[in-house]
Amino acid sequence: MLEIFLKTLPFFALIAVGFAAGKTRFFTEEATAYLTKFVFYFALSAMIFRFSANLTLGELVNFQFMMAYLSATGVVYVLATFVALIRKKPLTEAAIEAQCAVIGNVGFLGIPMLALLMGEAAVGHVMMILAVDLIVFGSLVVMIIVGSRDGRMSLAILRTLGIGLVKNPMIVSIVLGLSWSASGVPIPNPLNEFVMILGNAATPGALFAIGASLASKSAERVEVAAWLSFCKLVLHPIAIAIAALYVFDVDPYAAAVMIAAASLPVAGNIYMIAQHYGVAPQRVSASILISTAVSILTVSSVIAWVNQLY
């Protein structure tokens, strides 16, 4: 446990440095936004492309893996929605809370951290989780919010979702990488060096950006945020562990990666969705802040445990 904690500590130390830079205004919100854009559209995309170019579609798509993740995540999603509705919250807020309960920071934190701690073989499994999060749950929250406000579903919503997915650099990078892999053409050395250098900037850049963005978050509505953080950091990995280890036939290493990914704190992009649609942004902000702070201990504990599974 201590060994894993010491290995994860540098990741969270980088987040802390970013937080300090943002809190002291040395790094402004505008600077954080531009750094996030650089990581999202360039560095992380290069890293994902390089990894996926060395995978095949068969290695990435695993039915048992996806069913285990979808079913377990769906259980926690429904539970969080049910609790919100019991508190007499509108369906739009329930959808945002459910999103906080199951969607972790897989892109910015999960890919670089798990690649280093669990080996590069983990990246294919993490990308599968990322794709499910973006395509299934990312689309679901938008459909619920827009559909409940309009009182009906429309083709315009589906068109907006489709355009959003096509423009998402993570999805594009995965598709381009797999397409290159399918072509059977080796990546030219200059291109490989280019994406490697650019991709290497993803880890420090992403972690610093996470910390700097947290500096502008507030911890209002702590009780609800604590509940959502508990769902994300505890209930979600437990549900995933049950599904992957006991219900579905998932390879032990793949199951370990899935459980580790499920233990990650609430994703920052949920705040952007909440802010864009004006649905409980402060609640999401507090959930991101609390779950990230607590995850310093919980993520280490989970990774220490799952390392014994394979």
Image (cartoon, rainbow, N blue to C red):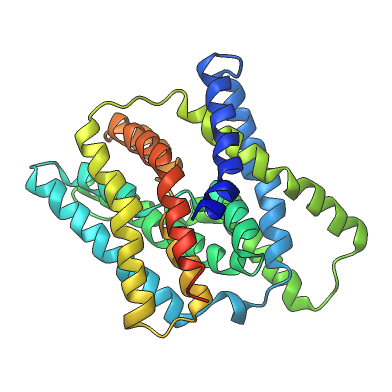
**Count of labels shown?**
0
Q: Which quadrant of the figure has residue 14?
A: top right
Q: Indicate whether 62 appears above or below 125.
A: below
Q: Is residue 23 above or below residue 17?
A: above
Task: Give the vertical position of 239 relative to 271 (above or below).
Answer: below
Question: Where 67 sits versus 131, above or below?
Answer: below
As drawn, the residue found furthest toward the front would be: 2
- For the question of whether residue 62 can be seen, the reply is yes
- Residue 46, image x, y percentages: 72, 52
Depth check, front residue: 49 or 108: 108
Q: Residue furthest bottom?
A: 249
For image coordinates 26% across by 39% down, the residue present is 226
Residue placed most toward the observer, 239 or 299: 299
Tell me what residue is drawn at x 84 percent, y 51 percent: 194
Question: How far from the left and from the top, in percent, is residue 155?
Answer: 35, 57
User: In the rendered image, which quarter is residue 67 located in?
Assistant: bottom left
Q: Position of residue 240 (x, y in %)?
A: 35, 68
Please tell me which residue is depicted at 27% across the width and 35% down the height of the picture.
Answer: 279
